[in-house]
Amino acid sequence: MTAQDALNRSYEIRTYGCQMNVHDSERLSGLLEDAGYVRAPEGADGDADVVVFNTCAVRENADNKLYGNLGRLAPMKTRRPGMQIAVGGCLAQKDRDTIVRRAPWVDVVFGTHNIGKLPVLLERSRIEGEAQVEIAESLEAFPSTLPTRRESAYAAWVSISVGCNNTCTFCIVPALRGKEKDRRPGDILAEIEALVDEGVSEITLLGQNVNAYGSDIGDREAFSKLLRACGKIEGLERVRFTSPHPRDFTDDVIAAMAETPNVMPQLHMPMQSGSDTVLKAMRRSYRQERFLGIIDKVRAAIPHAAISTDIIVGFPGETEKDFQQTMHAVREARFAQAFTFQYSKRPGTPAATMEGQVPKEVVQERYMRLSALQEEISWAENKTQVGRTVDVMVAEGEGRKDGATHRLSGRAPDSRLVHFTKPDTEVRPGDVVTVEITYAAPHHLLAEGPAVAVRRTRSGDAWEKRNTAAAAKPPGVMLGLPGIGAPAPEPAAAGGCGCD
């Protein structure tokens, strides 16, 4: 489709799942806008000319959620014959023709390896008057070569690899995303430098198993070298990464984190279980002692690091004794935060057919006990922050109550969420405000006194420029404000598709 053909046709993208999907949606937005589409306003709720579902296959009920949403769009599509619906992402890669059979009003189905084809498939469907299903079996082009509409002017995802070489029994992602494929270091650094030139000051390196980077190019220390190289980029203030696998978490990575000033004192590393028996059944290549040993090394090198994790409760065969080992590991690790999940069958995974499926009521009761323990630990760890002075990068959309409380919100270097009193001077997302922490809750910190300092940044300038330009657009061009949100330093569910 030419830009003229698509002029003023609006689009809406609905994203489910991990950071990989969020970043893929940025690329889908870039592709559509490059083809002449315009973004529908916030709250369009199916009123756009093109609605794209970027799906996740991790949870047991992922397909029910998709078909329920598709069903709600069916009458809208009947009333608006020119409307198009596209389904992409992991569930599309898995279900393929099933989607069109169950929802024949869908126009396009595309997979994880060929997101660049979306505009062409939409146009082909429009001309031929029938659904287009195109699923590539392997990556056609590294996604970072595609146009991208970044959702934030001050923070950005940067993919360093795609795919996964692990065989965790609870995860279907390797089958849908393929084997790990690494980008060349020079291409990654060139992208980061270009983003910094545009005003971005925080980047998050993204990969299914981010610290396995280098396995495809034959360099076991490639990830630590990449972190150190990021430290040499002028203007890049904050570097984060998600999600690493304990198997590949080597001493050179810890040293690079500790010795590179702009690599933030934060680590999200999925543990999944504290039981050696369960870890073996999961085909996780480490045991509790190895995991806790990594935590000890990180804390020795970076004393103020905030460490978070993912944990699955009720994996098939998990006994009360196994669960107590998880509780023990949580007490020992003292995570700042833990994303805990009740095990649910992922269709197509070995775990889904394992014996010893734990009854739902038992899983729920264990989940509640673990959540209560972690809540207690998170609160205690946050209380240690009271009295500290921290630099907070102001964020957009992080504080839902900011308007009512006359506060602003943002992230400290260790990724803790901080709500603080709005300074007298103008502050924009991307600017940095230095505050003293006065109160701690389990999931956030408060700074109720006056700001210690306010630093206007190039990122704040970039945010202001973007929003001024958006406000100046004529009403017919529906760009709106970013809808998915800035790339939050916090990891998505299950450490990025639940497999790390």
Image (spheres, helix red, strand yellow):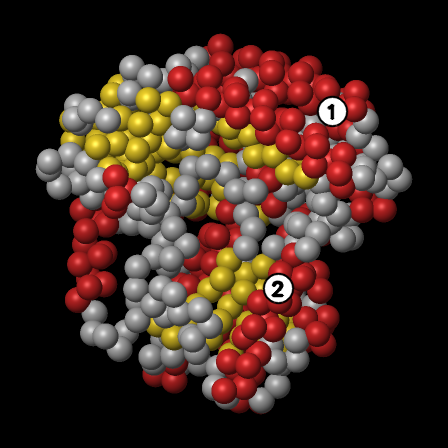
- Most distant residue in the top direction: 300
Q: Can see residue 325?
A: yes
- Most distant residue in the left direction: 425
Q: Camera-side residue: 459 or 259?
A: 459
Three-letter amino acid code at the position of disc 1: Phe
Give the mark nearest the N terminus, 1 or 2.
2
Report whether 34 appears left or right of 350. Answer: left
Q: Camera-side residue: 175 or 218?
A: 175
Q: Camera-side residue: 164 or 338?
A: 338
Report whether 51 appears left or right of 140. Answer: left
What residue is disc 2 on?
66
What residue is disc 1 on?
323
| Residue 50 position within the rendered picture, expressed as x and y whole percent measured from the top left | 46, 75
**Quadrant of the rendering where the N terminus is positioned:** bottom left
Q: Residue at x 74, y 24 (%)?
A: 323
| Residue 187 position within the rendered picture, expressed as x and y whole percent measured from the top left | 43, 46
Q: Residues within 10 Å of mark 2 (few under 14, many from 20)?
A: some
Q: Can see residue 431?
A: no
Q: Residue at x 22, y 49 (%)?
A: 462
**Quadrant of the rendering where the C terminus is positioned:** top right
Q: Residue at x 44, y 45 (%)?
A: 158
- For numbered disc 2, what is the local secondary structure? helix
Q: Residue at x 72, y 70 (%)?
A: 98
Is 109 rendered above or below residue 1? above
| Residue 160 position within the rendered picture, expressed as x and y whole percent measured from the top left | 50, 43
| Residue 89 position within the rendered picture, expressed as x and y whole percent measured from the top left | 59, 60
Is 272 rendered above or below residue 3? above
Distance from Cα at disc 1 to Cα at disc 2:
33 Å
